[in-house]
Amino acid sequence: MSCSKTLRNAALALALGTTALTPFVLHAQNNVPAGGAAVALARPAGPDFADLAAKVGPSVVRVSVTGKAKAAAELPPELRGTPFERFFRPQAGQKQAKPQGLGSGFVIDERGFIVTNNHVVGEAESVKVELADGRELAAKVVGTDPKTDLALLKVEAGGKLPALGFGDSDAVRVGEWVMAMGNPFGLGGTVTAGIVSARGRQIGAGPYDDFIQTDASINPGNSGGPLFNAAGEVVGVNTAIYSPSGGNVGIGFAVPSRLVKDVVAELQAHGKVERGWLGVSMQRMDATMAQAMAVPGDVKGVLVNGVEPESPAAKAELKAGDIVTAANGKAVRQPRDLAEAVGAQKPGATLTLSLLRDGKAVDAKVTLGAPREQQAAAEAPQQGKLGLALAPHEGGKGAVVAEVRPDSPAAEHGMQPGDVILRAGDRAVTSPKDVIEAVGKAREAKRPAIALQVERDGSRVFIALPLA
């Protein structure tokens, strides 16, 4: 590499390493007094976040979690009964380390309610919160919402805590200044600042993707911390980063406060979020698809490409090929719009969909159901004792394990989300109801356990779950 090219690269690295918030001094090389002392040019006035950080800092907390010990590596079926099996079994007296993690959070209610991310505390065995004044308190997980990656904690602080208020994320503009606070890499009380880089980002995190993108430095440990506007209002919850290296590269994502407020209110009131379920798969209408389906160019909407059997959509006679243009009178332009419209309603609510079908405008009234994992839990109160939530399996063969509660018999005996239960006791399983009835029958017979035939990754095995 030539010397001149090396110098150019060094200059570029220096330019990329400085930001509008990095203090620097330019020296006037052509304005040196006779005595030889350089004259520093005045630094332009920039944003000052000191007062804002002092105001909101006492409400930002550090969240530390301890998880369950990780299970030993699963034994491949082809190695069972061979001398190699011992390498997959924990040795006698060997203790497995419990994973630990760190994140951030912030107080939203003076009574001790704290917002953080679900991925920070979702698998936690215990949660602790360190307040800005140094106190460390045990925290209870009030509720979590994996679909938006939000969670609500509660601490007993023996008095009122300084709480933050939410701002209007819909009023946030691209280019305006924002400030993030949190616990990156375990370094609590860290303040970073930048601008709003974009709004409405979809990154494949879930059906309600609507992230605020910012170049304020967000790193591992910042998860669950607040993103502030210049007025000190929370406009987002820092949740994800784009990072090939694992560290900040200037692209971070925050859940907008509009969504956070609704989810937190549900968690605070009910410990969970109930959402309606429509039962369709959909895709965005692009220009090519519109031409192929002979849709007028001024028609915008989402294309229904599949309807689940026995779903609310099927009962309302929605069809593949329908184009949804509005929901309850609100325009639908992309799949997220329809997902949000459905998710904003409770199971049992009626949603009016405006459709374009075979070139004709029609309306369909749909009575929304509960997502199938909620149905299974509602239909099977006894499942809670085993620690399983079940959902129907495609084709009516078996029941899918939708959730395994930590510290439950199911978790202790190796059940995992995604497992398919094929038999329960003496009966074949075609739906969650079969598992419920088999468990009830086993309890009536006062059996100490029930045998479940489980299929996982193409392999089948029987698991005995205790019923006591």
Image (cartoon, rainbow, N blue to C red):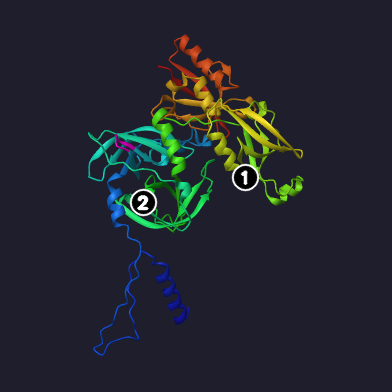
Q: Which residue is mark 2?
A: 231
The reply to whether discs 1 and 2 touch (Cβ–Cβ < 8 Å) is: no
- Residue drawn at (33%, 54%) of the image: 191
For the record, the magenta segment spans: 109-113
Residue 458, located in which quarter of the rendered image? top right
Q: Earlier in the sequence, mark 1 or mark 2?
A: 2
* Residue 83 on image: x %, y %: 46, 36
Where does the C terminus fall, quadrant-wise?
top left
Callout 2: 10 Å neighbours few (<14), some, many (20+)? Answer: few
Indicate whether 287 appears above or below 320: below
Q: Give the number of callouts.
A: 2
Q: Amino acid at mark 1?
A: Arg
Q: Amino acid at mark 2?
A: Ala
Q: Nearer the viewer, residue 28 or 98?
A: 28
- Residue drawn at (37%, 57%) of the image: 193
Q: Which residue is mark 1?
A: 333
